[in-house]
Image (cartoon, grey):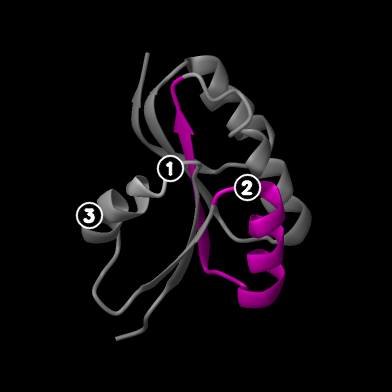
Amino acid sequence: MNSQHFLLISHQDSLARVVMPHVLRREDRLSVAADPFAASALLRQEKPDAVLVALEEGDEEAALFCATVRHYSNAPIVLLTLHCAREQITRGYRLGAEARRGRAH
């Protein structure tokens, strides 16, 4: 089996523990970044197969991570939405996201 490498961009480390068992297979690898600087460094060094961007309620800056990803990589961007406003999701799509999983208000 081929393993995949995912980059999760989230302000909450606890989200990585939630994502791991439900999104990734045992042989897949997950890197986590909490800010645009760490994300850009990981994108340049590790070349992930896909990027997961967590959009959470009240986090108006998270969608901007999509622009950072697009600047450094052509990897697919998936928005992980957790009770966030539709405007945040729309902004994420405008800034480069291709898909989403989760709920919106």
Q: Quadrant of the N terminus?
A: bottom left
Q: Amino acid at mark 2?
A: Asp
C-beta proximity under 8 Å, tags 2 and 1 = no
Q: Which mark is residue 22?
A: 3
Report the residue that reaches farthest toward the right. Answer: 71
Range of the magenta residues? Answer: 34-57
Q: Residue at x 63, y 47 (%)?
A: 35
| Badge 3 vs badge 1, beta-carbon distance below 8 Å | no
User: Label 2 to label 1, Cα distance in Å?
Assistant: 10 Å
Q: Earlier in the sequence, mark 2 or mark 1?
A: 1
| Mark with earlier residue (2, 3) | 3
- Percent x, y of residue 13: 40, 49
Is 14 within the magenta? no
Q: Nearer the viewer, mark 2 or mark 3?
A: 2
Residue ID at (28%, 54%): 17
- The disc labelled 1 sits on which kind of residue? Gln
Residue identifier under label 2 = 35
Q: Is residue 45 magenta?
A: yes
For discs 3 and 1, the disc positioned in front in the rendered view? 1
Three-letter code, disc 3: His
Q: CA distance from mark 3 to mark 1?
A: 17 Å
Q: Which residue sits furthest bottom? A: 1
Residue 18 in percent (x, y) is at: 26, 49
| Disc number for residue 12 | 1
Examine the image and state in which quarter residue 98 appears. Answer: top right
